[in-house]
């Protein structure tokens, strides 16, 4: 049965429930899929950082493989990127990614590009729904044990009376995802958590309405971690950034993301054919040694 996890609900969950999920990603290959927000890597690095910090004796294998502009609906608006290229679709690379990375767990955060910034439309909505279903089916067929659907972030916009607000479209997309009932699929309602947090503050998370800044990535990471049952300390991101452990984890994320993206191959403004991993994993292992030296200090 699908477990729908909004941040507020999870934080109020019984301690026994949280403890049951703690460290559930340890020893598993975890892949984060999504668009430019995932490719930027902020929330992926933070999720990895807290997993490493909260479970110093466990081993984690997290790959952030988001691609800017990507959808799972296969749609693209006229004139995208100044007319240079259409939006990429995850299914161009998903088969290769599943075959090469062989994830046990997949997190997928899509939707904000899938409505192509237009009003709610039956055909566009249907393309998104079909894409979500196809993603789940392909992941399961490839042996993925658990799929986490992360509902889209908010479109950070305060409309005037009568003005179109794209966030209303994303609200419908998120609502549909939370109502899915698919074995082995967990829905993390980021959209609801982010909307609640945004309504309680005056400053936007996203200056361009789409891409969250640091505080937005912190909220995204906390929402994911709360859904996993992790008890994340309340600390300022500025302090996290100063932590040598975070710097190493962030460097490892960037290194592996870059290497694995080329290893899988993708098509965006140009086609990038699959390439050997080269020294990516060797170099990542060296960073992991430094990470372990910090988090496993007796």
Image (spheres, grey):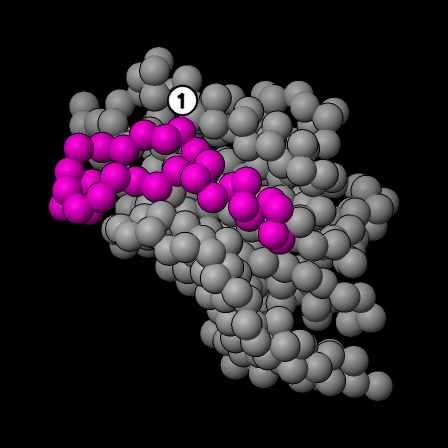
Q: Is residue 82 magenta?
A: yes
Residue 64: image x %, image y %? 53, 57
Report x, y in % for residue 68: 36, 51
Coordinates of residue 273 in the picture (x, y in percent): 41, 55
- Is residue 288 in view? yes
Left/right of residue 95 with respect to residue 157 in the rendered view: right
Q: Quadrant of residue 167?
A: top left
Does 37 sit above or below residue 41? Answer: above
- Against 55, residue 201 (above or below) is above
Q: Residue at x 54, y 27 (%)?
A: 134
Q: Nearer the viewer, residue 26 or 199?
A: 26
Determine if residue 195 is in view: no
| x 78%, y 80%: residue | 296
Q: Nearer the viewer, residue 51 or 74?
A: 74
Instruction: Name the quadrant containing residue 150.
Output: top right
Instruction: State the residue at coordinates (63%, 77%).
Output: 282
Location of the N terminus (image quadrant): top right
Q: Looking at the figure, which quarter contains the C terminus?
A: bottom right
Which residue is drawn at the image coordinates 41% and 59% (left, top)? 40
In-front residue for pair 266/37: 266
The image quarter containing residue 200 is top left
Say what secondary structure mark 1 lies in: helix
Report the magenta residues as a range.
72-101
Q: Check disc 1 and report the residue beneath it.
A: 127
Q: Is residue 41 above or below residue 66?
A: below
């Amino acid at each position: 049965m699908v477990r729908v996890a909004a941040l507020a609900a999870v934080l109020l969950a019984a301690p026994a429930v949280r403890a049951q999920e703690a460290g559930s990603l340890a020893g598993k290959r975890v892949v984060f899929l999504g668009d430019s927000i995932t490719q930027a890597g902020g929330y992926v690095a933070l999720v990895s950082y807290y997993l490493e910090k909260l479970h110093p004796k466990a081993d984690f294998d997290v790959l952030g493989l988001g691609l800017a502009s990507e959808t799972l609906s296969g749609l693209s608006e006229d004139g995208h990127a100044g007319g240079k290229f259409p939006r990429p679709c995850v299914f161009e690379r998903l088969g290769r990614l599943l075959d090469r990375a062989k994830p046990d767990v997949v997190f997928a955060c899509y939707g904000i590009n899938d409505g192509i910034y237009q009003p709610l439309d039956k055909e566009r909505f249907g393309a998104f729904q079909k894409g979500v279903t196809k993603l789940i089916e392909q992941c399961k067929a490839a042996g993925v044990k658990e799929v986490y659907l992360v509902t889209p972030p908010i479109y950070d916009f305060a409309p005037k009376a009568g003005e179109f607000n794209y966030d209303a479209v994303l609200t419908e997309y998120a609502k549909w995802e939370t109502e899915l009932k698919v074995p082995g699929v967990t829905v993390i309602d980021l959209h609801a958590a982010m909307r609640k947090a945004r309504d309680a503050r005056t400053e936007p998370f996203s200056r361009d309405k789409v891409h969250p800044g640091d505080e937005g990535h912190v909220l995204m990471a906390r929402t994911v971690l709360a859904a996993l049952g992790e008890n994340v300390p309340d600390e300022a991101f500025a302090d996290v950034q100063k932590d040598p452990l975070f710097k190493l984890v962030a460097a490892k994320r960037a290194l592996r993301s870059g290497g694995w993206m080329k290893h899988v191959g993708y098509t965006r403004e140009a086609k990038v054919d699959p390439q050997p991993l080269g020294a990516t994993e060797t170099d990542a292992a060296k960073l992991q040694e430094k990470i372990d030296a910090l988090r496993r200090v007796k």
